[in-house]
Amino acid sequence: MNTLFKCLVYDKQVSLSVLDTTDLVNKAIKIHNLEGKSAELLGNLLTVCAYMSGCLKSQRGAVSITVKSKDGSGSASVSGDVDLHIRGYVDGSCKHTLKGGTLTVIKDDGFSRPFVGACEIGGDNVSRIMTDYFHQSEQIPTAVSVGVKLADDNTCLSAGGVVLQLLPGTSEENMARAEEAMGNFLHPAEAISTYGAEGIIRTFFAGEIEQKGLYLLHPDYICNCSRAKFEGIIATLGKEELLAICKEQGAVKVHCHYCNTDYTFFEEDILKLFDK
Ligand SMILES: [Zn+2]
């Protein structure tokens, strides 16, 4: 089961999150038939998205993270909501390589205007990309270490990560402790497979956490698409246009990139749609 543990450490000045997203990443690999680089890139982005979704404050909150390659030949996108339903896809050249480009993060709390942060990225190291992002765009010192460990057959053996975020007013001493602690997680997927998410907290942060201050959440790979949702989207094209497509192509076909599901609407479905 996927887990996200959250707690405060170092005199309650630093927020610690530890994630085990092995099952979630395996689901993504299966849905999108990922291998090697594409499994690592999407897996790491899904883990970061699970972390950021766990930080959402409003019931209607949502977050999306998109990376686009410099030449526009590929992209990867993930999104999540307050229920920690995480989904994503990777396409084009990003399936094989990402040598820099742009990162865009949209955080929507469901009330005010969404926060949009963007920055240039230098490579494909998601931990570095997100650490830079938090520093540049949100101006919150945050150390992100995420990883995916794959077997030869592209099954995910372990995935997850550790995130330490400094709260306002963190002392120099506790900053140094946080930095030193991150040195233990240069290979986060290895750490997850060795200790497990809870084991990481008990092993590396023993004595720093209050038992009752430990939150446990369960992210999962779940797409929020539905036939009804796509009905609403295609209806905006209008009855005539949809019937014309049916005549020409036999049916209106819509594809959800996030869960690789096809929705097919035949002429009778279109007529019913406008009959309501
Ligand atoms: Zn879907």
Image (spheres, rainbow, N blue to C red):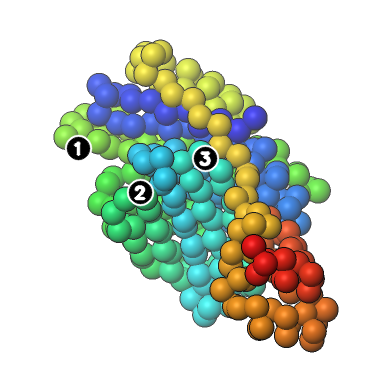
Which is nearer the N-term, disc 2 or disc 1? 2
Q: Which numbered tag is attached to residue 84? A: 3
Q: Amino acid at mark 3?
A: Leu
Q: Position of residue 127 (x, y in %)?
A: 46, 50
Q: Amino acid at mark 2?
A: Asp
Closer to viewer: mark 3 or mark 1: 3
Q: Position of residue 7 (x, y in %)?
A: 38, 25
Residue 152, relative to residue 245: is it above or below? Answer: above
Q: Residues within 10 Å of mark 2 (few under 14, many from 20)?
A: some
Q: Which residue is mark 2?
A: 109
The residue depicted at 44 percent of the width and 49 percent of the height is: 62
Q: What is the residue that sits farthest to the front in this orientation?
A: 275
As drawn, is 263 to the left or to the right of 111? right
Q: Nearer the viewer, residue 6 or 242?
A: 242
Q: Which residue is mark 1?
A: 168
Q: CA distance from mark 3 to mark 1?
A: 26 Å
